[in-house]
Image (cartoon, rainbow, N blue to C red):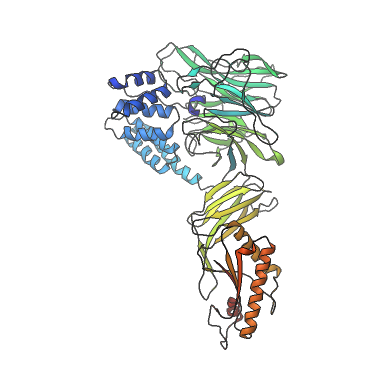
Amino acid sequence: MHNLYKSLLLSFLAGSLTLSGCQTTRKADRLYENFDYSLAIEEYQEVFSKKEPDLKGAQRLADAYRLTGRTKEAEEWYAKVVAMPEADPINTFYFAEALRSNGKYFEAKTQYQDYARKVPAEAARANAKAQASDAALKLLEEPASAIVVNETQINSGNADFSPTVYDQGILFTSDRGGNVSSDKDVDAGTYGWTGRPYLQMFYAQRNADSTWQMPAIASNTLNSVYHDGPAVLDSANTTMYFTRTHMVEKKQKDVNVDPTSWVKKPLSSDYVNRLEIFSARRDGANWTEVKPFAHNKVEEYSVGHPAISPDGQVLYFVSDKPGGYGETDIYYSELQADGTWGQPMNAGNMVNTVGKEMFPGFDQNGNLYFSSDTHPGFGGLDVFKVKGSRATWSKPENLRAPVNSPKDDFGMVFMRGANNAQVGYLSSNRDSGNGTDDIYSFKLLSNAVLFVTTLERVQVKGKRAITQPLADVRLKLTPKETNDSVVAFSDRNGEYKFGVQKGTTYDLVGDKFGYLTQSALVAIDTVKLADTTRVTLIFDKSQKNQVIAMENIYYDLDKWNIRPDAAKELDKLVRMLKDNPSIKIELGSHTDSREGHGYNQVLSERRAQSAVEYLVSQGIARNRLTWKGYGETVLINGCADGVECTEDQHQLNRRTEFKIK
């Protein structure tokens, strides 16, 4: 739903082929032609549950799903459309877009290439999209850029997006519905495109314990009876700039009919919806002096999505005004000495593309964040970061996963975090089944990397255990004292790279079916010159009675007490037992063949028992542990009595092992 509500989100042609109508779809067609897509979907579904769809109906249903952001259903119906002999080639492009939005990059690339062959005039655009699909696969290999959490307490089943930090919480845009006036019992109207109420601005206060109070609709000064939002405040919190939709008389043939998505299609009435920017001044708890931005021009085009630079001197916004680089561009206007805003200027082609750029915003350092559907990314809208100002910018940097996803990600806003951490909120429809957006909180990670290697331990009789890469291990990384986990899987080389925050301690847990779970506590150094911390997890199969040798468990000659170096190794066993609370083990100790049989038997029993007592002292229940001394009865090589062997060969026999019972 976000792409219906986010002003400037979609700019695809909504028109379908003009084919002969079908009597049974007449009502659905009428709803579709009036842009009541939500109701049209219901009618088409009803008809097609009883008969096979024709081309016109199938394409219109696919279009309706696309225009309401329901990419899963759009993919299903565009697949049916492109299989029909007379289907317009544009459906191949839309099919590719849906596949890409659903994270099916290889399949999307194939459809983009097919569209390029069918429509040579669009080959450059289609091939660029195909290359972007390849780029998305490479981006997936990069370490996580942030910890992202869905703020479920304030999200509704409708669209909730574009938060801005406001007082003790956030001001955000939603179509959940509510009274448009504090003193009039009037509900917000219904928007036919989505079948839900018009967009309004809401306020949600965050408590000291990070829980949320129930969102409440903002004052009627900020909300009208039509679409309102999103909004942004200046650094002093005294001036607000916000988007408002107006209906104006149509003066040209092809105009925007959806006030929030810039879909271009002729409207049968004499009116069209366009966006404007307004400002308001704070007066205590109230907002007053609401006035339009000097460069609104609803007769010809829309402006919206305001953002103010940290110094308050430059206002950035989005517009589809003629003369830009693409469908929607980011523009800026400078504050003049007399307090007015100067003539808008295009922010340049380093930021703007032939597609859609929108939802600008800034962090405290003055870096610009914006969303684009054309710069290389995962699909839909991705968030990008650039440094600079006005029309001079660095190369856009994709913020990678999990900030970005195959769906639409946008509306990034920052707030001050502890220890200068980069934290804030963003919007995405990644978890939505009906196309609507949710608000997420995020914490950006530093450029430090945690490089995890997962290995399988393979026991080789007569030799030390060897290791080999273990793929598809589920790795869960959680900052200490939080529940904000990131989950990934080791690749075919048994490796994965996490983006992490310096100065933070993480719990790392790895598990795979058929293997014992392993974990580690990882502290990311704040002063270490290298930005990469490496951790290796070694996995043993969880088979009963399989003997697993522990490395580096040494005892002094004729001694059985646990030395400090042996304690470090036994601590690993303690952690493994805590990670696998259902298993019981037998701990066995072995000697080499030197000294007498009786002496070696007693010595091995004492060593095994002392290891068990150490595990108990570290919190392992005694009923999970048994012990046994094997003396020299289970040698793993030929170094028996009378056989000349090296010290290293004898050492292989002086070992401590455990096996699952």
Question: Which quadrant of the figure contains the C terminus?
Answer: bottom right
Residue at the (51%, 20%) spot, across then down: 197
Left or right of 613 on screen, residue 426:
left
Q: Is residue 221 above or below residue 511?
A: above
Residue at the extreme right: 284
Quarter residue 331 falls in: top right
Q: Position of residue 571 (x, y in %)?
A: 65, 63
Quarter residue 130 falls in: top left
Quarter residue 91 falls in: top left
Residue 123 visible within the image: no
Residue at the (43%, 24%) spot, across then down: 38
Left or right of 593 on screen, residue 118:
left
Q: How many marks?
A: 0
Residue 152 visible within the image: yes
Left or right of 106 on screen, residue 190:
right
Residue at the extreme bottom: 642
Q: Position of residue 246 (x, y in %)?
A: 53, 15
Q: Position of residue 207 (x, y in %)?
A: 68, 32
Compare residues 103 and 328 and report the one nearer the observer. Answer: 103
Compare residues 254 and 74 and report the one nearer the observer. Answer: 74
Residue at the extreme front: 623
Q: Is residue 123 above or below residue 346?
A: below
Residue at the (53%, 38%) spot, across then down: 404
